[in-house]
Image (cartoon, grey):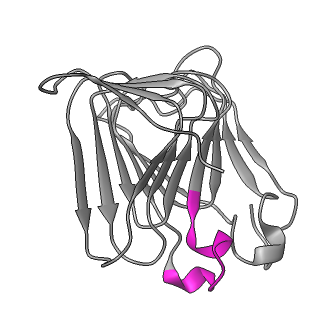
Amino acid sequence: INGQDPYNRDLLVGANIVNNGTGAVTLVINGTEGRSSSRYGTNEVILTGNNTFTGGTFVNAGYVVAQSTSGLAFGAGDLTITGGASTNGTTYQERVSTVQYRAPNQMSSSANLTLNGGAVLDMNGFSQTLAGLTFNNTGGNTPLLNVGTGTLTLNGNVAASSSNLGSVSTLSTGQVTVKTTAGSNIAMMAATD
């Protein structure tokens, strides 16, 4: 997507992204979503391929839709979502990077998810199994994981850190099952308005 101020220019990536002959491929997405508050929801990067690359995915800006119906949108590696850069502007939409599921299990069950700053993962009511989850509240908007009516199963730990006093990372609605806890391994989250 090129241009000074692209509007209504979704990018559909339907190709299967695989490792190259010399090593692992890493996918880095710096979308144009959120460059101005009037452009929110207009420039999506949509991943629909059966991706098998292992180098991980970094969503550094934009609105990314995970919609692979035949495999994994984010390949076999970890997913790191980092909130929108401070150069994006001052509104909430300009400071947030969002990944939204439109199908279940878009990440490998052995992958780790890291949410930095104003990162949002909206599972949109779909289910996912992960190895682990990390919230890094680095200032500004706080990380948000919205499970919705789906189920998030964690085979590893949940870690959280914060350099933003008075702010809390949010895990909202749905059911979270953590397999490495002492005592009960199900955390039920109340629905939020």
Residue 15 to residue 168: above or below: above
Residue at the far right in the pictured view: 8
125 versus 39 height, above or below: above
Report whether 117 appears left or right of 72.
left
Taking the view exactly as shown, the residue that stands out farthest to the top is: 70
Q: Give residue 107's position: percent from left, percent from top.
A: 45, 28
- Front residue of 21/164: it is 164
**90 magenta-colored:** yes
Where is residue 23 drawn, in percent x and y?
A: 28, 35
Quadrant of res 148: top right
Residue at 31 percent of width and 36 percent of height: 24
Q: Please state which of residues 104 and 29 is positioned toward the viewer in this rendering.
A: 104
Residue 142, magenta (yes or no):
no
Instruction: Choose between 178 and 35: the one closer to the eye.
Output: 178
Q: Is 70 left or right of 168, judged from the image as shown?
A: right
Q: Which residues are magenta?
A: 86-97
Which one is in front, 82 or 32? Answer: 82
Q: Quadrant of the N terminus?
A: bottom right
Residue 57 percent location from the top left of the image: 42, 45
Q: Quadrant of residue 3?
A: bottom right
In this rendering, the answer to whether 124 lies above or below 85 is above
x and y, in percent, of residue 28 in the image: 47, 53
Could you tell whether 142 is left or right of 102 in the image? left
How many labels sit on residues? 0
As drawn, 50 above or below 100: above
- Which residue is found at the position 16% from the left and 25% from the top? 180
Residue shown at the point (79%, 79%) measured from the top left: 4
User: Residue, x 52% and y 31% (percent of image)?
Assistant: 174
